[in-house]
Image (cartoon, helix red, strand yellow):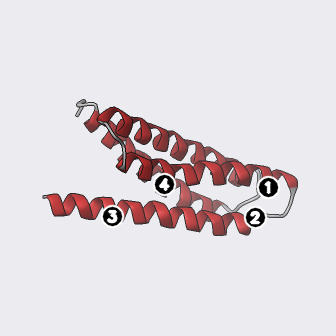
Amino acid sequence: MQNDKEKFKKDFKRRLYNLTLDTIKFLDALPVDNISRRIGDQLLRSITSIIGNYIEGQAASSKKDFTNYFNTALKSANESKLWFSILKDSGRAGKDIVDKYLIELDEISRIFGSSILTLKNKR
């Protein structure tokens, strides 16, 4: 059981890391204009916040801190979905590529949400 839990943590961390790197590549391919740059900056902040808060949560000193870091990571994942959607709906990024990110972020949000419920003993 413990090995499965550790494997999941390692795989999830790698998944978040790869999402961050893929998003950086995505941002580099955006049109070079003021609006794309500003929205891209917001997306970069929110997407990097997901893994940053996940890593900080792993080193949390209490269950409450751990839960707070996961809450922040969940909020950042949801914010990232907003920025991706704006880029898609404004025509600055293709629907197919953005939809892949939105699906991935939705799955990540569900994992964080489920973890938070478990941490709060509501599950």
Spatial CA span between label 4 and label 1: 22 Å
Q: SS at mark 4?
A: helix
- What residue lies at 61% left-to-right and 63% top-to-bottom? 23
Which residue was labeled with disc 3?
10
- What residue lies at 59% left-to-right and 42% top-to-bottom? 79
Left or right placement of residue 70 versus residue 39 in this view: left
Which residue was labeled with disc 4?
51
Q: Dot 2: few (<14), some (14–19), or many (≥20) neighbours within 10 Å?
A: some
* Chain-order first, disc 1 or disc 2: 2
Which residue was labeled with disc 1?
37
Spatial CA span between label 2 and label 4: 22 Å
Q: Dot 1: few (<14), some (14–19), or many (≥20) neighbours within 10 Å?
A: some
The N terminus - image quarter: bottom left
* Chain-order first, disc 3 or disc 2: 3
Which residue was labeled with disc 2?
30
The answer to whether the residues at label 1 and label 3 have Cβ atoms under 8 Å apart is: no
Give how far across and how far down residue 46 sits, in percent.
Answer: 60, 48
Q: Which amino acid is tagged 2?
A: Leu
Spatial CA span between label 3 and label 4: 12 Å
Q: Dot 3: few (<14), some (14–19), or many (≥20) neighbours within 10 Å?
A: few
Give how far across and how far down residue 101 sits, in percent.
Answer: 55, 59
